[in-house]
Amino acid sequence: MRHVDFSPLYRSTVGFDRLFTMLDSLGQPESAQTYPPYNIERTGENAYRISMAVAGFSEDEISIEAHRNVLTVKGERKEEGNGEGSELLYRGIASRAFERRFQLADHVEVEGATLKNGLLFVDLKRNIPEELKPRKIAITSSSDKAKQIEAKAAA
């Protein structure tokens, strides 16, 4: 496995520590976590949706938390009895607890979450502040500026 040393870049950059940490973590899988399965889709120019298969979980057994660019989805099943005299012969539906973390980009916020037909949908939206959006700068010729200065001096 390859490991890239980013220490020379730390000396010449300011404020990119989080980026280098994320690049370091790309090479290290999350201990091969595959449960629950999920999809990430783009639903608009600045809108995204995470869909997770959480069959058997109810709304009160799932918690969603967004904190400092990390979205955490946790699920804990409450113990349920199979009824008196029943015995489970085969368990094909997973009922184990899970915790899944998603790294969110800057200015991405959680809009809401819904649980429908065993799928949890988490809607995300990127809200870029006005001061960070690109803006058009008008270009004026230097002769126009000189005329404006002369007109102000004559007045």
Image (cartoon, rainbow, N blue to C red):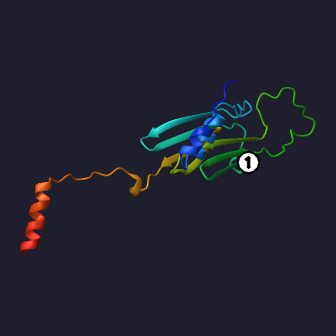
The quadrant the C terminus occupies is bottom left
- On the rendered image, what quadrant is the N terminus found in? top right
Residue assigned mark 1: 61
User: Residue 116, image x and y in percent?
Assistant: 61, 41
Vertical comparison of 24 with 65: above or below: above
Residue at left 56%, top 46%?
16
Q: Specify few, some or many for label 1: CA neighbours under 10 Å numbering under 14, 14-19, or 20 or more.
A: few
Q: Secondary structure at mark 1?
A: helix
Where is residue 58? Give x, y as percent.
70, 45
Q: Is residue 11 left or right of residue 137?
A: right
Quadrant of residue 81 within the rendered picture: top right
- Residue 43: x percent and y percent? 46, 39
- The image quadrant that residue 92 belongs to is top right
How many numbered discs sit on the rendered protein? 1
Residue at the location (60% across, 40% down)?
A: 20
Q: Nearer the viewer, residue 121 or 8?
A: 8
Q: Nearer the viewer, residue 120 or 100?
A: 100
Q: Position of residue 100 (x, y in %)?
A: 69, 41
**Residue at (63% x, 37% y) in the render:** 52
Q: Amino acid at mark 1?
A: Glu
> Residue at the top extreme?
1
Kindly tell me whether residue 147 is visible in this rendering.
yes
The relative height of residue 131 versus residue 73 in the rendered view (above or below) is: below
Above or below, comparing residue 134 to residue 155 in the picture: above
Farthest left residue?
154
The residue lying toward the viewer, choosing from 70 and 59, is: 70
Report whether 58 appears left or right of 127: right
Left or right: 20 as drawn, with respect to 96: left
Report the residue that reaches farthest toward the right. 85
Name the residue located 52 percent from the left edge and 49 percent from the top edge. Answer: 106
